[in-house]
Amino acid sequence: MIKVRPRPNEPVQQMMKRLKKLCEREGVLREMKRTAYYEKPSDRNRRSLRKAKRRLLKLSSMTMQPGGNRG
């Protein structure tokens, strides 16, 4: 549970900003969005496979040397 205690003479806006940062660090909003609706296991697996493929493509494009095949 995230708790934000007001500091002496701290405006409410500043306290809300600190709360927002803490929520972002803890991943509260991300978790709320993820669990907002039911996702079938097959859809979840399909989504995770797409992410893995994107990661692999990105890594492979980063490791390729410029000027590749000069055969």
Image: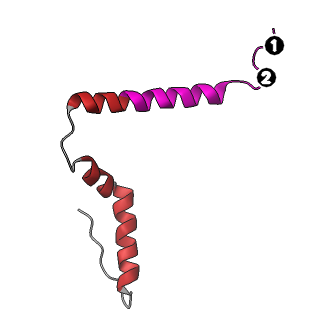
Percent x, y of residue 65: 73, 24
Q: Which amino acid does label 2 sit on?
A: Gly
**Occupied quadrant, residue 21:** bottom left
Q: What residue type is labelled 1?
A: Arg
Label pair 2/1, CB-CB below 8 angstroms: yes
Q: Which residue is drawn at 41% across and 29% down?
A: 50
Q: Is 50 situated above or below 30?
A: above
Q: Is residue 55 left or right of residue 9?
A: right
Give the residue number, with chain letter if any, for mark 1: 70
Secondary element under disc 2, as helix, strand or loop, is: loop
Percent x, y of residue 27: 34, 54
Assess whether residue 65 is covered by the magenta stretch. Answer: yes
Give the residue number, with chain letter if any, for mark 2: 67
Q: How crowded is mark 2: few (under 14 residues within 10 Å), some or many (20 or more)?
A: few
Q: Is residue 1 left or right of residue 58?
A: left
Residue range (magenta): 49-71
